[in-house]
């Protein structure tokens, strides 16, 4: 598996029990669905998106219905993150479907 990673950003985090540490994020994680499917890791992104939608379906998170004419539905978007190991290599791809503002 080949990954093109350009720049890593370390963010300082503090948990509720006072633990202080660093979390790594990549600046070049896809920001849109189009970027994700045109990315070199598109197979990985598609796999985790399918897994996420399957999980939402099996947990009966929602029921699709036709919206009433007087209501504007809330939109959604995908958020993509690569999780890095201690050595800086990608160990996990994550995709979440979230509501738009």
Image (cartoon, rainbow, N blue to C red):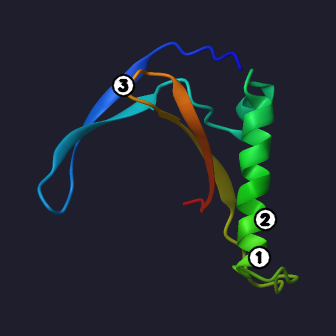
Q: Is residue 75 above or below residue 73?
A: above
Give neighbour class at mark 3: few <14, some 14-19, many 20+ (Cα, 10 Å).
Answer: few
Residue ID at (43%, 32%): 25
CB within 8 Å, label 1 to label 2: yes
Residue ID at (71%, 70%): 56
Element marked by disc 1: helix
Nearer-N-terminus badge (3/2): 3
Q: Is residue 94 above or below residue 28?
A: below
**Residue 40: % across, % down:** 75, 20
Give neighbour class at mark 1: few <14, some 14-19, many 20+ (Cα, 10 Å).
Answer: few
Residue ID at (66%, 53%): 77
CB within 8 Å, label 3 to label 2: no
Q: Is residue 76 above or below residue 8?
A: below
Q: Which residue is mark 3?
A: 9
**Residue 20: % across, % down:** 15, 45
**Residue 36: % across, % down:** 72, 33
Q: CA distance from mark 3 to mark 2?
A: 31 Å
Element marked by disc 3: strand
The mark tally for this picture is: 3
Q: CA distance from mark 1 to mark 2?
A: 6 Å
Q: Which residue is mark 1?
A: 58
Q: With 41 as the anchor, is 15 left or right in this view?
A: left
Q: Which mark is residue 38?
A: none
Q: Nearer the viewer, residue 71 or 92?
A: 92
Camera-nearest label, 3 or 1: 1
Residue ID at (73%, 80%): 62
Q: Which residue is mark 2?
A: 54
Q: Is residue 53 above or below residue 64?
A: above
The quarter of the displayed image where residue 5 is located: top right
Nearer-N-terminus badge (3/1): 3
């Amino acid at each position: 598996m080949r990954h093109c990673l350009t720049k890593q950003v370390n963010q300082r985090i503090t948990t509720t029990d006072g633990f202080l540490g660093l979390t790594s994020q990549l600046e070049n994680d896809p920001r849109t669905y189009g970027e994700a499917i045109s990315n070199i890791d598109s197979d990985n992104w598609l796999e985790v998106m399918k897994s996420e939608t399957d999980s939402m379906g099996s947990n009966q998170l929602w029921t699709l219905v036709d919206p009433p004419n007087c209501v504007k539905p809330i939109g959604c978007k995908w958020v993509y993150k690569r999780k890095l190991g201690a050595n800086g290599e990608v160990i996990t791809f994550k995709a979440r479907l979230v509501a738009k503002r």
